[in-house]
Image (cartoon, coloured by chain):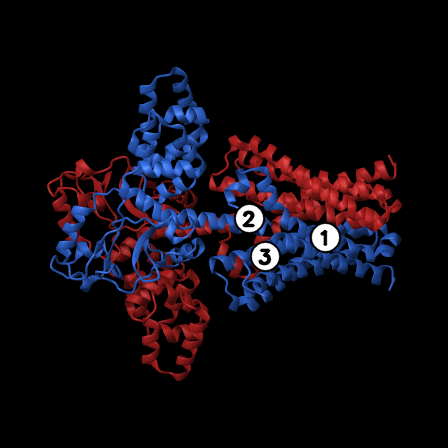
Chain colours: A red, B blue
Amino acid sequence: MINISATIDRIREILEDESKSQLAEELNGFHSADLADIFQALKPEERLECFKQIEEEKAADMIEYLPANLQVEILGDIDTELAARIITKLPHDAAADVLGDMEEDETEAYLDSLPQKFSEELRELMNYDEDTAGGMMTPLFMTVKTDMTVKEVLDYIREKAEEEHMDLYYVYVTDKHDHLLGVVSLRGLLTSPFKTKIENIMNSDIVKLHIDDYRDAISEVFMKYQFDSLPVVDQYNHLRGIVTWDDIQDAVEEETTEEIYASSGIATGDIDEDEILEGSLFTSIRARTPWLFVTLIGELIAVNVANCYGKTLQALPIIAIFMPLLAGLAGNIGTQSITLMVRGLSTGQLTLSSAFKHIGRESIIGLSIGSIFGLLVMVFTWGWQHNVELGLIVGIAMAINMLLASLIGTLTPFAMKRMNIDPAVASGPVIATAIDVLGLTVYFSLVSIYLLKLI
Amino acid sequence: MINISATIDRIREILEDESKSQLAEELNGFHSADLADIFQALKPEERLECFKQIEEEKAADMIEYLPANLQVEILGDIDTELAARIITKLPHDAAADVLGDMEEDETEAYLDSLPQKFSEELRELMNYDEDTAGGMMTPLFMTVKTDMTVKEVLDYIREKAEEEHMDLYYVYVTDKHDHLLGVVSLRGLLTSPFKTKIENIMNSDIVKLHIDDYRDAISEVFMKYQFDSLPVVDQYNHLRGIVTWDDIQDAVEEETTEEIYASSGIATGDIDEDEILEGSLFTSIRARTPWLFVTLIGELIAVNVANCYGKTLQALPIIAIFMPLLAGLAGNIGTQSITLMVRGLSTGQLTLSSAFKHIGRESIIGLSIGSIFGLLVMVFTWGWQHNVELGLIVGIAMAINMLLASLIGTLTPFAMKRMNIDPAVASGPVIATAIDVLGLTVYFSLVSIYLLKLI
């Protein structure tokens, strides 16, 4: 891994010296993935200057590693003919994504300037949603027939596989109507006698994707079966393309980001997660307010609960100062529980069938930790306020609140999963609010009954 | 994907009928990854019954997909000779992991019963930490010399690659002392003329792992360069093994889990994350209390802040009921900010150099959302309590608290990153506590100064 900031400093020095040959030498020495990191750290005008010095092959390679907004920025800034040549060098799925992110008239202009076969293939890919198998697949795969021999297939590969982005890990076996029949690995080809018929070494129990499968389902299949690439078929079992694991790697990362955002009450439903971090301010605000409104309503209920105990507060205002302590610790242990359950359900480590076991387990943990912290808080309050009874009430409230919090934190995700709602959605804010409402009720009731004998 | 619960029901019925042939037929029809899912849902005694009916090849395949505790459970329950045969069929890294998870005397017994070459290779792998390149690598790779021709290499592969777990995607080029010189892809071999010398088609700009590289560094390299497999070398550049992307997939998932746990204040440092969810109660409590203690100390400071305004509370106890509302909403927006920053820094979408941009951006968002919610809360309080001034103070406090919360939520992760501390660690609890302390100060000061003119 390279040291980005030192590299950027060096490149800026060369840029100041205006020595193009030195710049070209420096830049072309990097791996394309490193170049992509460097480009992300440069300023737009520096990027353009540097891009001109990179060899075309490497430039196309680097474009693949860049985020969508930079791909469009760079290709829009450079000469149109150069941009078209670079797009032609991209794998189909990457090219389709880049074109899809441009303005519509720009997309059309580029499509018209590309070689006809390539542009037709791209148009087809662009009909599919970027987040489905159809949008992720590449149409470059190798198909053979059942009655070919290993020798014939190897010769065929030697002849056909020059296309740079052709996936070669598997060779797909189809009938004359392009129905997918089976798959042969290169290992199988390279280790079988030349005369073996393909039908004798092909695997016909194929795990395949449907062209409309959505990103989360695809990444689940990849994570489960751990294949390097999977074939994509349409409803008639025609082989339409293949999706490779590196396409999925990005998808898995995006899924995880959405899950993490969702847990903290950031709505990702119809908003792209990149937009929330770097898009317009309005988009960010739109993603962040919905669950804040829910929190607002929840907390207004909490305010009302507290208000019901107005007399209690009037009689003993000191009790108010312990409210943040109780809410803070209960919120913290509740968040721990919900985090463990949501993540466990998401990775598949937990299932609905183990719900009761975990509810029991978390209750014991909540009670144990609650007792420890209840005791600490009791001793602290007693020592500080010189009031045994107040200490006892605050301590008991703490223990009960922490137990309740871990119970709610465990129950909620399982209940949501049972109702087919994503357990991650708004788990953080909802739990915090629920704990505030319940916790205050417990605390004020205890104070009213035992300390003030108000009821 | 199969329907697990329906499948389990069917298998239980067959188990009740005690028809072994039917059970065998049913089970052997599944893909090993599906079988692993089924086994995880079965009860221990059912597992043993079913395992006996699975063909050995498939059984070994399935064992690979199972979590560590089940691997050890099943291999411990079955006949020792069968277990040894199954272990022999596992890839080296999986076999080493399984043996490493057993009791020491069991491990030794198995190692002694395995073929000598295999057991020696396993012993070597087991010397490395499971979470380093040395512990993840397999020693099965194909090496060739620079002066061999493409034809010679292909013949060599045909002869040597029969070993089932040999990785074939790349062929590694070494000198006579096993130093790694370059790599040739199968694509390169299959598309070059037979007489081409390897040195002319090998890539010598190799991305490689060091044998002591830790899991997080390895997954970063894989995510960045998106290779299918990477060579592992020791300090003398001797090729020692290869790590494949599917080993990394699990590592990436574990890294993410640790990151998510860390954010909610669950300590994963020296505790395996599986243990926290399913291990002993004591382990879980040990992982969860440290940051709860920090929260306790933080909240005791908040209690002290509130106590300093004892007179204010005494004079106007109603102000206490708005405390959860202020803390809840500020906590929520602060958590959103910290989540966005921590995740962005973790995926590389954010870097330290963009810190100021994001601090500014989040401030504007915090101020905007804070103003909206401040206004809402002001109107609500005014309408409810018929007190314009109280409404104004609560509303203003809300706006300031939400702005402060998003500012702290943005600053903290960048500051931690700058100090080389993992920004995820305890971000949730720390931010919540900081917001409580600051928020209460703001609120009580406003009330004391403008509402009660106490100061």
* Label 2 element class: helix
Residue at point 82%, 55% (across, down): B307
Up-down relation of residue B395 to residue A436 (above or below): below
Nearest to N terminus: mark 1 or mark 2:
2
Query: In percent of the image, x 51 and y 41: which residue is there?
Result: A344
Amino acid at dot 2: Tyr
Which of the two discs, 3 and 1, sits closer to the camera?
1
Q: Is residue A7 above or below residue B281?
A: below
- Tell me if A5 is positioned left or right of B444 in this view: left
Q: Do the CB atoms of the residues marked 1 and 2 lie less than 8 Å apart?
A: no
What residue is shown at x 19% (from left), y 38% (from top)? A201
- Disc number lying in front (3 or 2): 2
Please report, as a chain letter, where disc 3 is located: B
Q: In the drawing, does residue B290 fall left or right of residue A25?
A: right
- Which residue is label 2 attached to? B261
Establish whether labels 3 and 2 are both on one chain. yes
User: To which residue does mark 3 refer?
Assistant: B338
Q: What's the amino acid at mark 1?
A: Glu
Q: Position of residue B121 (x, y in %)?
A: 31, 46
Q: Seen in the image, is A129 located left or right of residue A181?
A: right
Distance between the Cα atoms at labels 1 and 2?
21 Å
* Quadrant holding the C terminus of chain A: top right
| Left or right for A152, reference A55 | left
Indicate the chain on which mark 1 is placed. B
Residue B353: x, y in percent?
51, 69
Q: Dot 2: few (<14), some (14–19), or many (≥20) neighbours within 10 Å?
A: many
- Quadrant for residue A284, please give it: bottom right
Q: Which of B228/B363 is in front?
A: B228
Q: In what element is the residue under mark 1?
A: helix
Name the residue carrying label 1: B299
